[in-house]
Image (spheres, grey):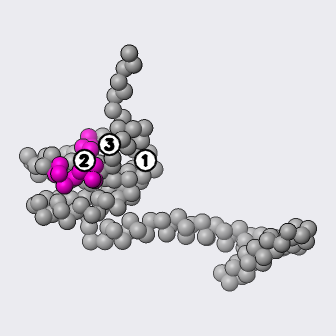
Amino acid sequence: MLTIAFSLSRITVQAQDSSPSALAFFQHLTPWEYILGASGLLILAVLFMKIQQIPSHFRAKGKSTLDPEQLEGLMTNSPPQIVDLRPREQFEGKKGYIRGALNIPYTEFRKRIDELDTSHPRPIVLVDETDKFSHELIPLLERQGHRWLYVLKGGYRAWRRSKYPIYHLPTKPKK
């Protein structure tokens, strides 16, 4: 790992030099130095992608989450109540929504909490764009007496990345 960092730092220092000798540096690299440099860049790219998932992991600590595959499986049996917390414009827009989702934007949730269907016990799955706001509402729903609560891990972005069906409201016919 130290060799990779050293090779990358040599490349960086040499590349910043605007003289023609910067190109000469690359001509004197051995194939192993190219391989080490490429491996180092690949490792950095993988670490960068994993770091982006860390906030979701910390928000979910101690809370029940579902990944998109689990939610899709749950929807085939007795469907949960999916509450989409994104703004109405996003829900109705080109990004679409998950089948059967009820749109109650996060900013209106406290006022509209009574719209949740409590006629029979079924899980409630909260969905927002990244899962940040969903985790914030779990304590509120628990205080209201709801116990079967889940958050879609990674939010609606994770759902879209998983390539599960996305639905759109019917467009209004043009006159």
Helix, strand or loop status at disc 3 = helix
Q: Is residue 38 depicted above or below 131 in this figure?
A: below
Q: Position of residue 166 (x, y in %)?
A: 38, 40
Query: Horizontally, is 81 left or right of 156 in the view?
Result: left
Query: Horizontally, is 171 left or right of 108 in the view?
Result: right
Helix, strand or loop status at disc 1 = helix
**On the image, numbered disc 1 is attached to which residue?**
160
Query: Horizontally, is 49 left or right of 5 in the view?
Result: left
Q: Residues within 10 Å of mark 3 (few under 14, many from 20)?
A: few
Q: Could you say which is closer to the camera, residue 20 or residue 77? A: 20
Q: Amino acid at mark 2?
A: Ile
Q: Which circle, 3 or 1, is nearer the viewer? A: 3
Question: Can residue 160 be seen by looking at this rendering?
Answer: yes
Q: Is residue 114 depicted above or below 57 in this figure?
A: above
Q: Residue furthest bottom?
A: 2
Q: Position of residue 15 (x, y in %)?
A: 80, 70
Q: Is residue 105 magenta?
A: yes
User: Label 2 near label 1: C-beta < 8 Å?
Assistant: no
Res. 104 mark: 2
Q: Amino acid at mark 3?
A: Arg
Q: Position of residue 20 (x, y in %)?
A: 91, 68
Helix, strand or loop status at disc 2 = loop
Query: Which stretch did the figure color magenta?
Result: 100-113
Q: Earlier in the sequence, mark 3 or mark 2?
A: 3
Q: Is residue 76 depicted above or below 143 in this figure?
A: above
Res. 31 mark: none
Residue occupying the point 21% across, 59% down: 149
**On the image, numbered disc 3 is attached to which residue?**
88
Q: Could you say which is closer to the camera, residue 35 or residue 83? A: 83
